[in-house]
Amino acid sequence: MSEPFDVEEEDNDDDEDNNEEISEKLSPPEVNSVFDSEVEVCEYYKRYGKQNGYGNSHRKVVDSLNPKPVGKSNCKVRLCAKRMDDGKWCVTQFVNEHNHDLSPSKAHRFRCNRKLTNNAKRSLSLYDEAGIPINKSYITLVVEHGGHENMSFNKKDCENYTRTIRR
């Protein structure tokens, strides 16, 4: 039995930073494109969305005949795929109709494109053990990365991580 899912746009107005660069220009996903895994489909669509100025999220579909628009903007953009009998994933639908402006220059700031690096996690753990306040720890990380524009995370990500390691 196939397991359909949607990868939809995620509406993000957050002001976060991410330094991941897209090395190649990705073409839009095409119906009947085949991927080896669900993760591969999601990663491709995530990179495509980032390249074109929107974020996206992944969810399993309960009622594929009645898709729900996502986020505050009520945008209908989506990619649907299902698992085939051979275990590979096939794109069954791709809707690329946005009802809002796209922001490729700000896509790296969207929550779905942020990631706290292992090096930053290690540094934050050490700074926390040494009793260094989070604001000074964050400033140190900014300097280590050569500025905010080179970071794949923001101060709130650091605060959240520090809170989880203290538990």
Image (cartoon, rainbow, N blue to C red):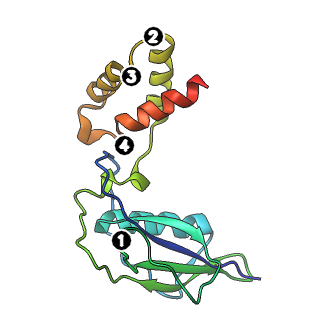
Question: Element type at marker 4?
Answer: loop
Other-residue count near label 2 (Cα within 10 Å), few / some / many at <14 / 14–19 / ≥20: few
Res. 73 image quadrant: bottom left
The secondary structure type at the circle numbered 3 is helix
Residue at x 40%, y 13% (from the top left corner) = 132
Q: Are marks 1 and 2 in contact (CB under 8 Å)?
A: no
Which residue appears at 45% of the width and 39% of the height?
A: 116
Crowding at mark 1 (Cα within 10 Å: few <14, some 14-19, many 20+) = some
Callout 4 crowding tier (Cα within 10 Å): few <14, some 14–19, many ≥20: many
Q: Which mark is residue 152?
A: 4
Q: Of the numbered discs in the image, which one, if any, rests on residue 26?
A: 1
Residue 94 location in percent, x, y? 45, 84
The quadrant where residue 62 appears: bottom right
Residue 38 locus on image (x, y percent): 61, 68
Residue at which label 3 appears: 134
Q: Residue flagged by tag 2: what amino acid is it?
A: Gly
Q: Nearer the viewer, residue 32 or 156?
A: 156
| Mark 4 / mark 2, whichever is N-terminal | 2
Q: Amino acid at mark 4?
A: Ser
What's the distance in space between the residues labelled 4 and 2, CA to CA? 24 Å
Quarter placement of the C terminus: top right
Q: Looking at the picture, how far across and down is residue 78, in whole percent?
A: 45, 78
Q: Residues within 10 Å of mark 3 (few under 14, many from 20)?
A: some
- Of residue 43 and residue 7, the one placed in the foreground of this image is 7
User: Mark on residue 131?
Assistant: 2
Q: Is residue 115 left or right of residue 14?
A: right
Query: Residue at (43%, 65%) from the top-left corner?
Result: 56
Q: How many marks?
A: 4
